[in-house]
Image (cartoon, rainbow, N blue to C red):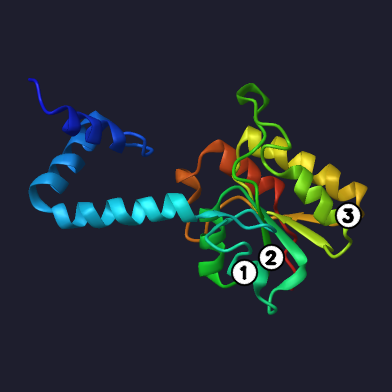
Amino acid sequence: MLQSPLIESLIEAFRVLPGVGPKSAQRMAYHLLQRNKSGGAKLASVLSDAIEKIGHCSLCRTLTEEPTCHICASERRAIGELCIVESPSDVQVIEQSGIFAGQYFVLMGHLSPIDGIGPQQIGLDLLELRLQQGDIKELIVAMNASVESEATAHYIQQLAAQNSVVVSRLAQGIPMGGELEYLDSGTLSQAFLARKQLID
């Protein structure tokens, strides 16, 4: 069936989102056009503003409309602790927990030589400069459990060692309330490797 080229363009535009296939994109497009044109107009306006005005923090590389994000600008944050994460959404998750009071460094990905993503593409040259300044005492690696993330963590560990900075890593393994029979072998092996001695 032939349909409007503009509708086709709208459907195709929705497909840039992760996990959105042709059918989902078509449903979204028709929903906005049939039932929520005002919502669609607001979405278009906010999206346009965000694309134009949001950039990267000059210190941690997270997404912000200011030159320096509110976390890096805060005087309450411990400047000696730097948590390394892969994406801005990781920062949000950690912030919502309220458990960390230091600063962040957002890689915006991980090393992947096959895809042409080297140290400079994920800001490791900027991280090295921060380590050389001498303010950072501990790097906390909070990255996903994947082969690429492991390689990235190893690279970061080498940078830290060259600058006499302690590196720690978030524990991985059995989640609170998890049952052994439902765990995959990778999670179970991480749990064994990260086991701790029980203290009375």
Instruction: Kindly identify the residue that appears in the image at 76 percent across and 65 percent down.
Output: 81
Residues 84 and 170: in front is 84
In three-dimensional space, the C-alpha distance between marks 3 and 2, rounded to whole angstroms, equals 16 Å
Q: Using residue 6 as the reference point, say whether residue 77 is left or right of it.
A: right
Amino acid at circle 1: Ile
Amino acid at circle 2: Gln
The tag earlier along the polypeptide, 3 or 2, is: 2
Instruction: Kindly identify the residue that appears in the image at 68 percent across and 25 percent down.
Output: 113
Residue tagged by mark 1? Answer: 71
Residue tagged by mark 3? Answer: 132
Q: Quadrant of the C terminus?
A: bottom right
Instruction: Kindly identify the residue that appears in the image at 20 percent across and 42 percent down.
Output: 28
The tag earlier along the polypeptide, 1 or 3, is: 1
- Provide residue 123's location: percent of width, then percent of height: 70, 44
In three-dimensional space, the C-alpha distance between marks 1 and 3, rounded to whole angstroms, equals 21 Å
- Provide residue 30's location: percent of width, then percent of height: 13, 41
In the figure, 79 relative to 57: above or below?
below
Q: Are marks 2 and 1 in contact (CB under 8 Å)?
A: yes
In the figure, 68 relative to 48: above or below?
below
Residue tagged by mark 2? Answer: 103
Amino acid at circle 3: Gln
Secondary structure beneath label 3: helix
Secondary structure beneath label 1: helix
Q: Are marks 3 and 2 in contact (CB under 8 Å)?
A: no
Q: Using residue 23 as the reference point, say whether residue 118 is left or right of it.
A: right
Residues 132 and 171: in front is 132
